[in-house]
Amino acid sequence: MIYKRSSELFASAQKVIPGGVNSPVRAFKAVGGEPIFIKEAKGAYIYDEDGNELIDYINSWGPLILGHAHKPVIDALVERAKKGTSFGTPTELETKIAELAVKMVPNVDKIRMVNSGTEACMSAVRLARGFSGKEKIIKFSGCYHGHSDSFLIQAGSGAITFGTPNSPGVTEGTAKDTLLATYNNLESVKQLIDANKDEIACLIIEPVPGNMGCIPPNEGFLEGLRELCDANDILLIFDEVMSGFRLAQGGVQERLGVNADIVCFGKVIGGGLPVGAFAARNEIMDYLAPVGPVYQAGTLSGNPLAMAAGMAMLQELNDNPEIYKSIDEKTEYLHKGIEKVLNANDVTYTINRLGSMISVHFSEEPVVNFASAAAAASNGKFNKFFHGLLENGIYIAPSAFETWFISEALSYEDLDKTIAAVEKVAKNL
Ligand SMILES: *Cc1c(COP(=O)(O)O)cnc(C)c1O
């Protein structure tokens, strides 16, 4: 494939944007090579500036669960835009989307909109600290909760990809209040709780992590966390920025039947526009300004364009619950197809999947936490796999620490094309 124009655009971008990108993982540094500049996209396909057509498994890193330029979302946006794009004062639409979100998600009474997943997680933790009067938080190595200071301690995704788990600029004072546990390991959580009795405000977790590849929780792990949190008066925060409205209408809480105290959203809830949100029961949410003492605000929060896109997306998912079964089946089909061609070519691998989240790791060892994900990523095979797929018109995330984001726009023919591309690439792995 030819990437002449992309390459020129990247050169220009690097002169005025650090690294040529507005979010690090886009730069292809982990896999080598240069990023592709996209011109447009429709359904399951994106088209780059050189005219290459690619089947997209990134889908804007998760939001586009129904594919690119989905008509109801675009129509809602266009209609809304004609009437003005921002007022900084309440609109009815904000109540409508809040009503729908609260109806779809179990165990929450109120929701507050923000502009990104980062903001949602940052605000949720502030709320948990304010509500509990305690300062420390527990997070898990390899889980990503956005780029605010308290979370840049062994964060997943881009932060792992770039080997800067502890970013300069995060103070020791901040870092000392973030305690690190091991995913799928209850004992590691118990030890932290015992060593920090009555000091822990909350435990934040990607209940089904997607930022160290997809890692399903072991049986009883989330339930065990719920019990530990209850027994020790710790608020349990589910960061469902990726899994929310993806693994079920009600996210992991619904799918795996474990309740959280605060839930964070992003990605799908914005329908492709910049939206984040956090939700909880009344008692907790009413601790927020202007009713409560915990301050949180945003000039563009609840922005009419963003809410129009989010509302159209949630309505589609609410009105068509069969979508969840359909994308899960597509993901399973892809899983089986990839498994078959990798087996036939004697490639060692582990595939993790839950619902429409899936990741392929080039190691035989089970990938159950950050250490095993990192071990599986250390042999360089993923980079060959990534570039091989790209040459064959398949666009997956340029990092071994990402899930594939399956969209309902993918047809079985697209999945077959993908499996055929994997087969070609597998011969050289
Ligand atoms: C993407 C993501 C975030 C951060 O969201 P942004 O909108 O990029 O700030 C936080 N948590 C999880 C689980 C995510 O996948």
Image: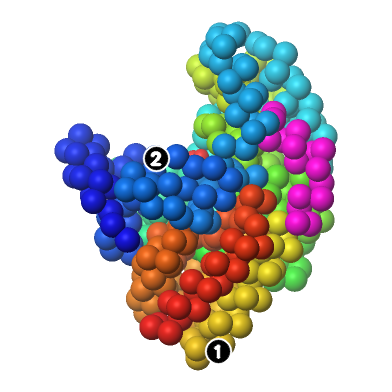
Q: Observer-nearest residue: 312 or 117?
A: 312
328 shown above or below 340? above
Query: What is the spatial separation of the Cα atoms under label 2 and label 1, in whole angstroms?
Result: 37 Å
Quick one: quadrant of the C terminus?
Answer: bottom left
Mark 2 CB in 8 Å range of ligand 1? no
Q: Residue at x 20, y 34 (%)?
A: 16
Task: Examine the image and state in which quarter residue 404 appears.
Answer: bottom right
Q: Magenta part of the protein: which range?
A: 311-326
Could you tell me residue 37's position as x and y percent? Answer: 34, 45
Looking at the rendered structure, the kind of residue marked 1 is Ala
Structural crowding at the residue carrying mark 2, measured as other residues with C-alpha within 10 Å and reported as few (<14), some (14–19) or many (≥20): few
Q: Residue at x 66, y 76 (%)?
A: 336
Q: Can residue 412 be seen from the camera position used here?
A: yes
Mark 1 CB in 8 Å range of ligand 1? no
Q: Observer-nearest residue: 77 or 147?
A: 77
The disc at residue 424 is none
Structural crowding at the residue carrying mark 1, measured as other residues with C-alpha within 10 Å and reported as few (<14), some (14–19) or many (≥20): few
- State the residue position of label 2: 39
Q: Residue at x 61, y 16 (%)?
A: 80
Q: Can residue 136 be seen from the camera position used here?
A: no
The disc at residue 344 is 1
Could you tell me residue 147's position as x and y percent? Answer: 43, 43
Task: Examine the image and state in which quarter residue 149 appears.
Answer: top left
Looking at the rendered structure, the kind of residue marked 2 is Lys
